Image (cartoon, helix red, strand yellow):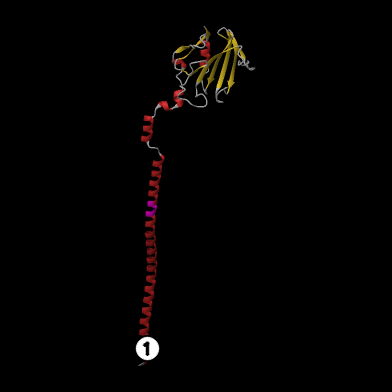
Amino acid sequence: MNEPTRAYGSHEEDCREREREREREDLENQRPLSRTSGLDLRAQNRGAMRAPLLMLSAIIALATARASCSSEKEAMPPTTSSASTATTASPTTSATATATPSPVSSVAWIPFVLDSIPEITFQYPSNWYRTTPGSPSTLTSWDPQSWHGPSLPPGGIGVSVDRIRLDDPALEPRPKDATDIALAGATGWDITYVGGIDSAPDTMTRVIALERNGHRYYLKASFGNGADESTFTRILNTFQFR
């Protein structure tokens, strides 16, 4: 009676042992699966999170590119506007352009005659302007109606002539820095003022005084920045008494 009981108990214990072994095996088999599943899940989660980030980066890059293009378009002036301005602009609105005369070598020279000083004459460029009909008389290489600056225009030349009696109390004395000059059979003095005498500091003025038959004759030339002084020299070479 006792052996069957032990055999039954031993058999039951064997069964329990085998069940525990199977449980352990199941647990061991399930642990890698759970770890793999966790890794796969984390990978999927990372992939799921990466996709929106990549999409957001693409959207930001596109928006930045559009903003850059838009700013460049706003910074660039429209070509149609500048073309229209260039087409409709009038050259007479530019004082500098109208004040610059043609080269004296390309124009004819004409005689200067003044009723109040009929005994003198000289040649000057025909495209110059005569601004004062009396004495002193002034010639300018630019149109005085188009230039209203405080000094002469760039390249501009102004020439004036005048006469005064030698016994006139208003006669100025000879400047101490003046040099002797002889022109057209008359003698006198010549002086150059850097900075002008009645004009802005950027003007140079040359004054020539000739004395003849009880009178002093003044020839004054003022030069704007960059003016050709040889033009006045040519005028002096044509000066004569009649």
The rendered magenta stretch, by its main secondary structure, is classed as helix
Query: Relative to the observer, which residue lies in front, 71 or 215?
Result: 215
Q: Residues within 10 Å of mark 1 (few under 14, many from 20)?
A: few
Quadrant in the picture for the N terminus: bottom left
Q: Is residue 230 visible?
A: no
Query: Relative to the observer, which residue lies in front, 188 or 171?
Result: 171
Q: Where is mark 1, residue-wise?
A: 6
124 within the magenta span: no
Q: Is residue 125 above or below residue 60?
A: above
Q: Is residue 25 above or below residue 40?
A: below
Q: Position of residue 91 (x, y in %)?
A: 41, 26
Q: Position of residue 103 (x, y in %)?
A: 46, 18
Q: Residue at x 35, y 87 (%)?
A: 8
Q: Amino acid at mark 1?
A: Arg
Please tell me how many numbered marks the rendered image carries. 1
58 within the magenta span: yes
Query: Is label 1 in a helix, a strand or a loop?
Result: helix
Q: Is residue 236 visible?
A: yes
Q: Position of residue 220 (x, y in %)?
A: 55, 17
Q: Position of residue 81 (x, y in %)?
A: 37, 35
Q: Quadrant of residue 170?
A: top right
Query: Relative to the observer, which residue lies in front, 77 or 98?
Result: 98
Magenta residues, start to end: 55-59
Q: Quadrant of residue 77?
A: top left
What residue occupies the far bottom of the structure in this picture? 1
